[in-house]
Image (cartoon, rainbow, N blue to C red):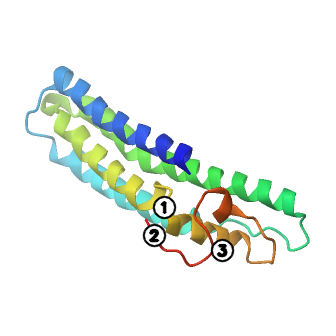
Amino acid sequence: MHALRLLVAAVMVALVLMGVALTVILGAGAPALWAVAVLVVFGVAMHLVISATMSTPTPIPGGTSTEEARAKGMKAFQSLLVGRLALAESVGVVGILLAFVAGPQRSVLVYAVGAAISLLLLALHVWPSHSLVDKVATSLERDGAGTGLREMLGVGGPGLGAP
């Protein structure tokens, strides 16, 4: 789980560093309100998309061998995590775009709104927490296959709702 947390943390740090670089290029004037509104709506949409489509992976069939179930479980968790990461980070990427096309009101603050929403989405939906691992493992094991996902990621058994 350490490597997955490093990946997510690197994306989070990159969002902050991008803001520092954009401050030099764009300045910190008043942001275009339409751009801020677009980012807020887009952020809410990404939250809903992640919640609705990226929450429960397809269960692994009950008769699957232990080794195959473990491999499929880890692959499913990693795919889910990367998909969530891409959707959450997209708000920050759109923030960069809007910061440059906001006309005379070009401002790093437009990007800052997008980055803040992305950071919130990353913390809520992407950070590899014990509860996320437990939720995904429970979904994958719904048909009786034992993925060992909790043990492989160092979370332990079901029901451990630690950070």
Label 2, secondary structure: give it: loop
Residue located at (37% from left, 46% from top): 91
Q: Which quarter of the figure has residue 44?
A: bottom left
Say above or below: 19 vs 71: above
Task: Answer yes or no: is residue 101 visible.
Answer: no
- Quarter of the picture holding the C terminus: bottom left
**Of the residues under marks 1 and 3, which one precedes in the sequence?**
1
Per the image, the residue denoted by label 1 is: 129
Q: Residues within 10 Å of mark 2 (few under 14, many from 20)?
A: few
Q: Residues within 10 Å of mark 3 (few under 14, many from 20)?
A: many
Per the image, the residue denoted by label 2 is: 162
Location of residue 100 in the rendering, given as x and y in whole percent from the top left corner: 26, 29
Label 1, secondary structure: give it: loop
Q: Amino acid at mark 2?
A: Ala
Q: Are marks 2 and 1 in contact (CB under 8 Å)?
A: yes
Q: Which quarter of the figure has residue 109?
A: top left
Cα–Cα gap, marks 1 and 3: 14 Å
Location of residue 54 in the rendering, given as x and y in whole percent from the top left corner: 57, 62
Query: Left or right of 49: which side holds 149?
Result: right
